[in-house]
Image: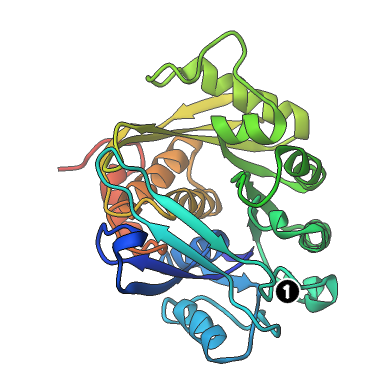
Amino acid sequence: MKVVTFGELMIRLQPFNYERFVQANTLEFSFGGGEANVAVSLANYGADAVFVTKLPSHAIGQSAVNSLRRYGVDTSKITRGGDRVGIYFNEKGASQRGSVCIYDRANSAIQLATTADFDWDDIFEGVDWFHFTGITPALGENVVEICREACKAAKAHGVKISCDLNYRGKLWTREQARAAMTDLCQYVDVCISNEEDAKDVFGIEAEATDIYAGEINREGYKSVAKQLADKFGFEKVAITLRESHSAFDNGWSAMLYDVASGEYAFSKKYDLHIIDRVGGGDSFGAGLIYALLSGKTTQQAVEFAVAASALKHSIEGDYNMVTVSEVEKLAGGDGSGRIQR
């Protein structure tokens, strides 16, 4: 299987352990970004994962490229140019104190990119799947246009397209997100979301039910997924649910709606004690893409994706460094959610 992902790869700067920004004397240096995280996961599963972006040709840009190469991601389609690598500062939450993320992404190489920087017909040659998130078009109208060109080319090459809505209020308004994502989602086959993103981006809420009631409300899940599918003609819709008890302790589960069969498959729920939650949604997306391309059933696919994400929450950094066998062992071996002993 060959998968292309497109987005921004950023420098991640983080205080040691659980220090706050105002008390930190040093910052740990690594790399991460939604679609890059997906590519690393897929490469670790043995897929041919290609990451597309624009990065400067200087030493920091090369370090970013190298961070992907070490895990087997194909970086040959990355365009080199520009002056800046985007940065995000991450302060990890603890107990009742939530995490803090501060962006420094203005004028990064990818934010200033143009459609001329990418030859999508070449990029999609022999490709099975294309993935992007709602974070990437939020970088600017020019990047919306790049995403549109990518989606059109992917469709022309018969490539399946998935999108994680991932609304980021720090990057654009709900109105901007709705306009851009309404346009881009017409090309999407598999939508990944949660109830908050569906509401923020498209104003879609569960019908006649409270999806914020504290416990998983299955009818609420079904309602949101069906409304999304009906609006855009998606083939599948995945909805994730995070129950936040504290910065350390979350409940984590998901549902996958298959439109053709009308099946709503609910995963088992994991009670997580979190080491690092950044990249949790990306690891779910990567697990789902791998499972669907591997021919797993709807139930097996959602179990694999949730188990992959549960494992990511135990790993420091953006990237999910786990194998297929580790995910399947947690999911239950056969992907049914039953633990094999």
Tell me if residue 135 comes above or below residue 149 in the rendering.
Answer: above
| Rendering quarter of residue 82 | bottom right
Q: Which residue is drawn at 54% across and 59% down?
A: 34
- Extreme residue toward the bottom, this view: 58
Q: Where is residue 232 in the image (x, y as percent from the top left)?
A: 76, 34
Residue bearing the label numbered 1: 123
Tell me if residue 214 comes above or below residue 335 in the rendering.
Answer: above
Q: Where is residue 339 in the image (x, y as percent from the top left)?
A: 22, 39
Q: How is the image coloured?
A: rainbow
Q: In this view, does 323 lie to the left or right of 74?
A: left
| Rendering quarter of residue 273 | top left
Assign a secondary structure to mark 1: helix
Q: Where is residue 116 in the image (x, y as percent from the top left)?
A: 85, 76
* 10 Å crowding of disc 1: few (<14), some (14-19), many (20+): some
Q: Is residue 16 left or right of residue 305?
A: left
Q: Which residue is drawn at 44% across and 55% down?
A: 279
Q: Which residue is drawn at 69% across and 27% down?
A: 203
Q: Where is residue 121 in the image (x, y as percent from the top left)?
A: 81, 72
| Rendering quarter of residue 147 | bottom right
